[in-house]
């Protein structure tokens, strides 16, 4: 039994018997039947690798992999969350996190700016429930009902439209003093004049944003921080 050998069907090399996988076949009449497979473990490994290389870029395989990972995550979710929570409490984790922040300061700063900008662009004209509730509470009124919130929202929107139509004469244009392009009046910001009257800015919104960006860049180069960065 110890010195038993077998010839592999694929590579044709004679190898010890433990180099061949043991297989079980369940038979109803004769009970379980054990036997060794025809190809050696090494050849099986090679074939599996080849097969994997063939299918690894197909959409079906990727989907299967994704599904497997998802299932695994949901099965062990509570366990994983507990583990992460415990890891966060350790001193080593905190030190690692601190070192990472120190090393990637610029990257994190950029990310923060981008996400803030994106949020602002998305919610520039949004009237969230929280915003309206705060309006009510700051004026000393009780917490509003959903109907009151809807009414207040509509009122604010109408006010905004009135303000826009009052200050914006449709069809009028103006020439930007910086880029020289003739643009619609809505492309220029409103600003307060010296005597308190409201004027249109002399440069367009696009040039204005460019100016602001240049100013910020200059300040950054001068070593002044216009935004305080704090990490918890
Ligand atoms: Zn072989
Ligand atoms: Zn311009």
Image (cartoon, rainbow, N blue to C red):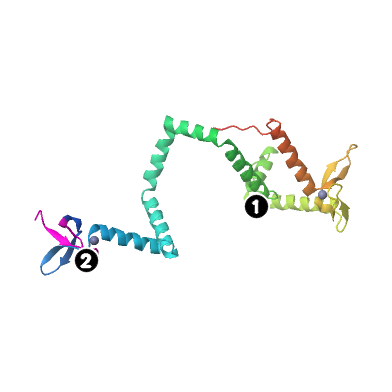
Residue at left offset 43%, top offset 29%: 91
Q: What secondary structure is found at the residue carrying circle 1?
A: helix
Mark 1 neighbour density, 10 Å: few (under 14) some (14–19) many (20 or more): few
Q: Nearer the viewer, residue 180 or 9?
A: 9
Residue 176, position as x, y percentages in the image? 85, 49
Q: What secondary structure is found at the residue carrying circle 2?
A: loop
Q: Residue furthest front?
A: 13
- Label 1 or label 2, whichever lies nearer to me, is 2
Residue at left offset 41%, top offset 40%: 84
In the picture of the structure, the residue carrying the numbered disc 2 is 9
Mark 1 CB within 8 Å of ligand 2: no
Q: Is residue 180 left or right of residue 70?
A: right
Q: CA distance from mark 1 to mark 2?
A: 79 Å
Give me the disc on residue 109. Answer: none
Up-down: is 103 above or below 34? Answer: above
* Region rendered in magenta: 1-17
Q: Quadrant of ligand 1?
A: bottom left
Would you identify the image quadrant in which residue 140 lies? top right
Residue 230, position as x, y percentages in the image? 59, 32
Mark 2 CB within 8 Å of ligand 1: yes
- Quarter of the image where the C terminus is located: top right
Q: How many marks?
A: 2
Q: Nearer the viewer, residue 87 or 65?
A: 65
Residue at left offset 89%, top offset 41%: 197
In the picture of the structure, the residue carrying the numbered disc 1 is 147
First in residue order: circle 1 vs circle 2 = 2
Residue 8, position as x, y percentages in the image? 20, 63
Would you identify the image quadrant in which residue 17 lies? bottom left
Q: Is residue 172 left or right of residue 92?
A: right
Q: Residue furthest bottom?
A: 29
Q: Is residue 2 magenta?
A: yes
């Amino acid at each position: 039994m110890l010195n038993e050998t077998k010839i592999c069907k694929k590579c044709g090399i004679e190898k010890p018997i433990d180099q061949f996988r043991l297989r079980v076949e369940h038979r109803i009449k004769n009970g379980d039947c054990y036997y060794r497979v025809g190809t050696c473990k090494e050849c099986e490994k090679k074939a599996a690798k080849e097969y994997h290389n063939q299918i690894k870029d197909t959409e079906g395989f990727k989907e299967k992999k994704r599904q497997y990972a998802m299932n695994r995550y949901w099965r062990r979710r509570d366990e994983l969350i507990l583990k992460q929570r415990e890891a966060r409490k350790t001193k080593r984790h905190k030190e690692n996190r601190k070192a990472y922040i120190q090393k990637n300061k610029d990257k994190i700063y950029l990310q923060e700016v981008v996400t803030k900008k994106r949020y602002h662009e998305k919610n520039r004209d949004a009237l969230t429930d929280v915003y309206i509730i705060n309006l009510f509470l700051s004026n000393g009124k009780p917490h509003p009902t959903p109907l009151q919130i809807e009414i207040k929202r509509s009122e604010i929107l109408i006010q905004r439209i009135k303000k826009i139509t009052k200050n914006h004469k449709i069809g009028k244009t103006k020439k930007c003093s910086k880029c020289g392009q003739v643009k619609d009046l809505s492309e220029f910001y409103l600003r307060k004049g010296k005597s308190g009257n409201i004027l249109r800015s002399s440069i367009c919104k696009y040039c204005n944003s460019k100016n602001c960006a240049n100013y910020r860049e200059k300040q950054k180069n001068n070593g002044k921080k216009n935004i305080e960065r704090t990490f918890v």
